[in-house]
Amino acid sequence: MNTIPDEIFNCLCNNQRFLILLHQKPDGDAIGSAVALGKGLKQLNKTVDYYIDLPLEDKLGFFEEIQYFNQTLQDDYDVIIYLDCSSSSFAFSPAEMPTAKTRLVIDHHKSNAHYGDLNFVEITGATAEIVFRVLRGLNVVFDEEMADAIFTGITTDTGSFQFSNVTVDTHLIASELYAIKTNYAHLSKRLHTQKNINQMKMTGAAIHSLEILDGMPIALMILDHETIVKFGGTINITDDVANLGQNTIGVAITALLKEIDPGEYRVSLRAKYPYDIHEIALKYGGGGHERAAGFNFCGDVGELKQDLMEVYANQNGEA
Ligand SMILES: [Mn+2]
């Protein structure tokens, strides 16, 4: 397992007042990373504030540390830490941004823009893996909630250790988590299997919309605005929905279109190796990883379908 760079270590050791920011609509990796890093820094007698896009999905609401989210912010910090956030425009940040000596970016997205004064960016399974290494490097002692937080980040971003982003390090870190707490079965079930009734219905509607594009191994699912409203809003669209298209035998690329407002879509893309969909996400002003990316889309869905078919055809030619 790689250690952490000296300048990151020094930044965290030699400063006192930290603000933690995450991407909008934070997922398990973002929240898990924030909880673990925030608690770890507090253990070192630092002060830590969080500014986070609430409410959280039901399944992430169990961390006690959440009670300290979004308390009164200071005008000035030593360090603002951006976690799991590939560009500053994706960050959920206060209208009046506090000043800081240093912006520190800790992230694992391939598309990361290295927008910090210090950037700790590596292509790992989850940002939580990097946070774990940071905390180990700082000699922080993990309590059970911090172990749960790192586990939450890793298991959600790796699809319960099923995705191609899983590495030796992912499992080495998981093995260390089992030395802190012996059983993660309950947490796994909470994060991957259980849904409230609206989430169940929303998932069903997405599957119902599933189509295969023109005989190509591309799956498309649309949750239209009416459906999203009917089942309680985007908060009830669970992360696994985009993966369901990928679970269809023969499918290589999946697009899930979520009509957030009439005519305005949030698109989630998934791809199987060797297909790379992060370029198409960048083209539309979004970002992400090679096999999981997203962007906002406002336009003709037919054109988007054509684009996806072209991406497949071009890359299939190279393969
Ligand atoms: Mn992540």
Image: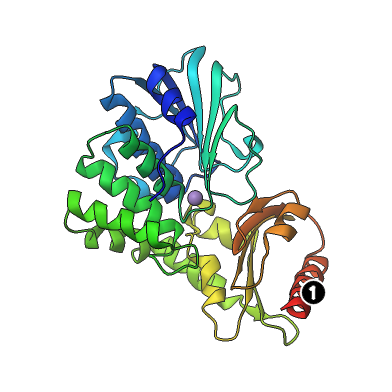
Q: Horizontal placement of 234 versus 309: left or right?
A: left
Residue neighbourhood size for the residue with mark 1, other residues' Cα within 10 Å, grouped as few (<14), some (14–19), many (≥20): few
At a point 23% along the width and 60% down the height, the residue shown is 186
At a point 49% along the width and 21% down the height, the residue shown is 79
Q: Horizontal placement of 216 versus 55: left or right?
A: right
Which amino acid type is shown beneath numbered disc 1?
Asn
- Answer with the quarter of the image where residue 172 lies: bottom left
Q: Position of residue 7 (x, y in %)?
A: 49, 28
Q: Position of residue 87 (x, y in %)?
A: 63, 39
Q: Position of residue 275 (x, y in %)?
A: 66, 71
Q: Horizontal placement of 67 versus 34: left or right?
A: left
State the scheme by which the image is colored. Answer: rainbow
As drawn, the residue found furthest toward the left would be 182
Q: Which residue is mark 1?
A: 314
- Res. 261 visible in picture: no
- Answer with the quarter of the image where residue 210 lies: bottom right
Q: Position of residue 284 (x, y in %)?
A: 76, 53
Viewer-nearest residue: 54 or 282: 282
Answer above or below: position of 9 versus 163: above
Answer above or below: position of 78 versus 189: above
Viewer-nearest residue: 313 or 93: 313
At a point 63% along the width and 37% down the height, the residue shown is 114
Disc tally is 1
- Answer with the quarter of the image where residue 175 lies: bottom left
Quadrant of the snapshot with the C terminus: bottom right
SS under mark 1:
helix
Q: Horizontal placement of 246 versus 162: left or right?
A: right
Viewer-nearest residue: 41 or 293: 41
As drawn, the residue found furthest toward the top would be 75
Q: Is mark 1 within 8 Å of ligand 1?
A: no
Answer above or below: position of 47 versus 304: above
